[in-house]
Amino acid sequence: MVGQIKRKNRLKNILLIVLIVLIGIFVTYQFYSTPSKTVREFFTYLMREQYEKAYNLIDGEYKEKRGTLEKFSKEYQDAVRSGTRTKGVKITGFKKTDKQNRVIVNVTVRALYFGDIIDTNGSYVVQKIPGKGWRIVDNVSSSKEK
């Protein structure tokens, strides 16, 4: 009888430990930044028309190319007004580059374009920047990978 109670308590303790570990993994994933999450968040913010949040996920020369927040926002607002809307994003892969803390994230973006749903493929260089985390620093969809 005492042995049976000890086994039940041991089983409860094991289940409790497993539950705590799973919750820890989930919470860590929610708050842990990755290159893929950064690209996914970028497009999610664009879908929600939260342009400032999307703009804050780009950096470096790419941010310079895209211009000010006002210019960046206006480009996407104009696209929405003309009937183009991002409907979804799927991360299709990633690979390391020659530079440390840089990866290329491949995506497929689903968009409503003049009444048709289209999928377009893209590739973005994402870099871990001290004090900022992962940021999109280049779009290499139509150029050679760096």
Image (cartoon, rainbow, N blue to C red):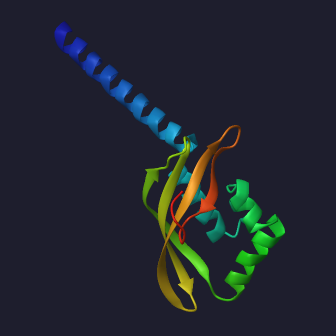
Q: Is residue 5 visible?
A: yes
Residue 108, image x, y percentages: 47, 70
30 or 119, nearer to the observer = 119
Q: Residue at x 55, y 47 (%)?
A: 102
What is the quadrant of residue 17 in the picture? top left
On the image, the x and y values in percent for residue 138 come to 62, 60
Q: Which quarter of the image is occupied by the C terminus?
A: bottom right
From what the image shows, is residue 144 above or below residue 110?
Answer: above
For the point 51% across and 69% down, the residue is 122
Q: Is residue 88 above or below residue 6?
A: below
Left or right of 5? Residue 103 is right
Q: Is residue 13 left or right of residue 1?
A: right
Q: Which x, y percent locates residue 112?
A: 55, 83
Q: Residue at x 73, y 60 (%)?
A: 63
Outermost residue on the bottom side: it is 115
Is residue 1 visible to the viewer in this orientation of the structure? no
In the displayed structure, 5 sits above or below 116; it is above
Quadrant (top left/top right/bottom left/bottom right) for the N terminus? top left
* Residue 24 position within the rendered picture, expressed as x and y whole percent measured from the top left: 47, 32
Place residue 99 in its image quadrant: top right
